[in-house]
Image (cartoon, rainbow, N blue to C red):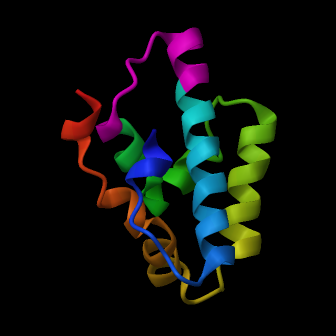
Amino acid sequence: MIFEQLPSIERDYIWHGRGCRLLFTIIEILVYLREAKFVIIDYGKIIRLIELKNLKALTDSDIPEHCRDSLKEYISGLLPVGNEYPVHEFITFRFLKIDTSDFS
């Protein structure tokens, strides 16, 4: 349902794919936290976790190893050094435009 709400894009499919993969990882982490620590999942938590500083903090937290590896690969391997924040914002800005009233 989230992907149906994303603004359409005509190019930049590689960056869009990286954003979708990141979103899947974030959702997987939240599901783990819901099951292990009874954290309530909502769209606001997804948006907060997508912030780059929070992703970096998650790499040192108690989450499944494959999620930690995926985040480390995203942060260290996919974001260009020196331009991490603007590129990350470009990758994730589509998720910030989702109208959550459609989920009610």
Q: With respect to residue 28, does 71 lie above or below?
A: below
Residue 79 % position (x, y) = 65, 77
Give the main secondary structure of the magenta stretch.
helix
The residue that appears at 53% across and 82% down in the rendered structure is: 10
Residue 47 % position (x, y) = 36, 48
- Is 76 a magenta residue? no
Quadrant of the frame with the C terminus: top left
- Marker count (numbered): 0
- Among all residues in the image, which is located at the extreme bottom? 82
Left/right placement of residue 86 relative to residue 31 reads left
The stretch of residues the image draws in magenta is: 31-44
The residue that appears at 56% across and 49% down in the rendered structure is: 23
Q: With respect to residue 20, does 1 lie above or below?
A: above
Q: With respect to residue 98, does 43 lie above or below?
A: above
- Is 43 a magenta residue? yes
Residue 66 % position (x, y) = 80, 39
The residue that appears at 53% across and 49% down in the rendered structure is: 57
